[in-house]
Image: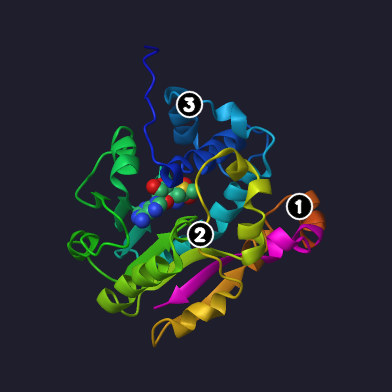
Amino acid sequence: MNGRTPVELGPAQETLLIPLYGRAMETRKRKPLVRDPRAVEMVASIDYDFARFDESGSLRGSVLRGLVFDHWVREFLTEQPNGTVVEIGAGLNTRFERLDNGTCHWVDLDLPDSMALRRRFFAETDRRSMVAGSVVDPDWVAAVRQHPGPYFFVAEAVLIYLSEPDARTAVGHVRTTFPGSRFAFDTWGQWIIDNRHRHGALKKMSAKLVWACDDPRDIESWHPGIRLLDTSAVGGHPELRRHLPLLYRVLMPLVHALPQSRSYRLNLYQV
Ligand SMILES: C[S@@+](CC[C@H](N)C(=O)[O-])C[C@H]1O[C@@H](n2cnc3c(N)ncnc32)[C@H](O)[C@@H]1O
């Protein structure tokens, strides 16, 4: 026994350790894009070989991706400071710690084993709930309804682990029970699915990328009323690009020409 928190997670659930480690490693840099001391603490206290992800482009990629989702959530909270953010597949994300304005409400949803790990590090308050369950199963809806609208849903690197029918079901739950909400999630194209054995940190894990989506506009046809409001490549969002270091701004167009970058989109919908 080394006194550290053991990890007992299913294959898709284990991937939550990649963005956690990404934020921890970023925080240690001289000029980090994100500062996340909680992630540093969690990495230090979890019994896991995080070093297997070192040198993987997934770490910086997950940080850049998170900045875009943070931007959309921040925009929502500026317009709706008393609204509720629902973080689907929350993992060990610290978005609440980064964006809490003191008045918003927050619901973290994740599969039971991921949520059990999350509960070791985070506590519920009267504004913040944690719910164990699958986004595909509508049981979580009642817990969200206990918080005031309007609602913003975010599923960062989550729906890609579902089958397409399950992803449709998850989007459908949000659309039918919280119509008019905004929902941010990423889509991964067929190229990435076909080349997943070469993909950054994921190639070291047994999780399967399942749902391929080459055009984020396709989701508009899933349910009447869904509209794509914004879509961005990782690191390519115009609101964020100007805050990135010069080297990034110079290199980003080249990175975006790569098939894996063209195949991966961060999307904001009105549902
Ligand atoms: C790559 S991690 C992302 C974690 C977090 N969103 C972040 O960015 O740090 C994928 C997450 O999706 C969760 N997940 C996978 N399938 C799910 C489902 N059916 N319902 C809810 N969460 C799910 C996993 O447990 C895991 O926490």
The residue positioned 45% from the left and 68% from the top of the image is 164
Q: How many marks?
A: 3
63 horizontally vs 40: left or right: right
Crowdedness of circle 2 by 10 Å Cα count: few (<14), some, many (20+)? some
Kindly identify which numbered label has been placed on residue 48: 3
Is the residue 265 above or below the residue 201 in the image? below
Label 1 residue SS: helix
Q: Is residue 256 magenta?
A: yes
Three-letter code for the amino acid on which mark 2 is drawn: Val
Label 2 residue SS: loop
Residue, disc 2: 210
Q: Is residue 198 magenta?
A: no
- Magenta stretch bounds: 254-271
The answer to whether the residue labelled 1 contacts the one labelled 2, judged by CB atoms less than 8 Å apart, is no
Q: State which quarter of the image contains the C terminus.
A: bottom left
Residue 134 in the image: state x and y as whole percent.
Answer: 30, 56
Quadrant housing residue 257: bottom right
